[in-house]
Amino acid sequence: MNDEELRDRPRPLAAPASVEANDNLSSSQRVTALAMRARAAWSSQDKLGEQRAFTEMIAAMEGQLLVYARVRIGPNDVEDVVAEAFVKFLRQVRSDVRISNAASLLFTILRNLITDRHRRKERVDSVSDHELLSQQANRLAPVAGAEDEVISRIETNWLLAQVPEAERVVLYLRHVQDLSVEEVATRTGLSVDQVKKRTAEGIKHLKEVLHR
């Protein structure tokens, strides 16, 4: 709940909303009332009250959001995207945005986040292996003939630093110095098959990093 980005924003005016044991409220109405209660607590700087209301809202909606996400995105991303949806929703609660149906808004936020993730993945998958490595190589602006220095600089690059060193050296020789598989094998003492395997594994690691 300690979101520095939101801490100093002007607090919207909101009338307290009571949801205490009101059996006449539908599930959707209850979630909306909890959102309004969280907003009222935020407005009055009642951190504990805001946390309680938001915790109740998560308990009421998390299961439904998880089910929705599981059929639309990879299993490794489900919990993260649902958590991100709640964070974005909290920003809405702490703003002047009118919330008439909190449950519907949560699902809309979640759907948009899932769509964005799919679009990012499509962009990554559309980049060829050679283009992926060339983009990183261009950022490094290597100095010709200074292999040790360049490899050291590659290690400082956040993305390529995620690749194990043995794979990183092969990727550098293959796609930065543009050597053939046979030339890399001669330079490193590896077999041709080992060079191909390490190149493929290095590219796989790069794509995994980009998908996080």
Image (cartoon, rainbow, N blue to C red):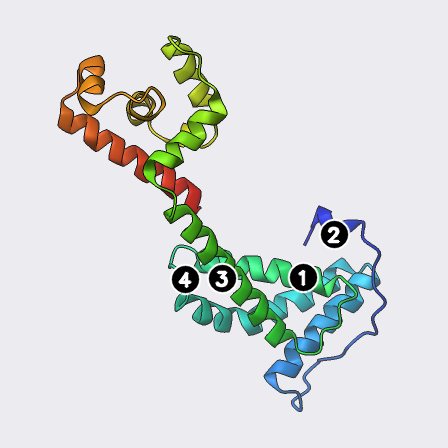
Q: Residues within 10 Å of mark 1 (few under 14, many from 20)?
A: some
Q: Residues within 10 Å of mark 4 (few under 14, many from 20)?
A: some
Say if 53 sits above or below 6 in the image. Answer: below
Task: Give the residue type that dot 3 points to.
Answer: Thr
Task: Return the residue at label 4.
Answer: 73
Task: Return the residue at label 1.
Answer: 90
Distance Cα–Cα, label 4 vs label 3: 9 Å
- Give the label, 4 or 3, closer to the camera: 3
Say if 205 sits above or below 99 in the image. Answer: above
Say if 57 sits above or below 121 in the image. Answer: below
Task: Return the residue at label 2.
Answer: 6
Q: Secondary structure at mark 2?
A: helix
Q: Secondary structure at mark 3?
A: helix
**Relative image position of residue 186 (x, y in whole percent):** 18, 14
| Residue 26 horizontal side relative to residue 186, left or right | right
Q: Is the Cβ of the residue at disc 4 closer than 8 Å to that at disc 2? A: no
Of pointers 1 and 2, the one earlier in the residue sequence: 2
Q: Residue furthest top?
A: 145
**Relative image position of residue 63 (x, y in whole percent):** 48, 71
Q: Is the Cβ of the residue at disc 1 closer than 8 Å to that at disc 2? A: yes
| Residue 199 horizontal side relative to residue 74, left or right | left
Of pointers 3 and 1, the one earlier in the residue sequence: 1
Mark on residue 115? 3
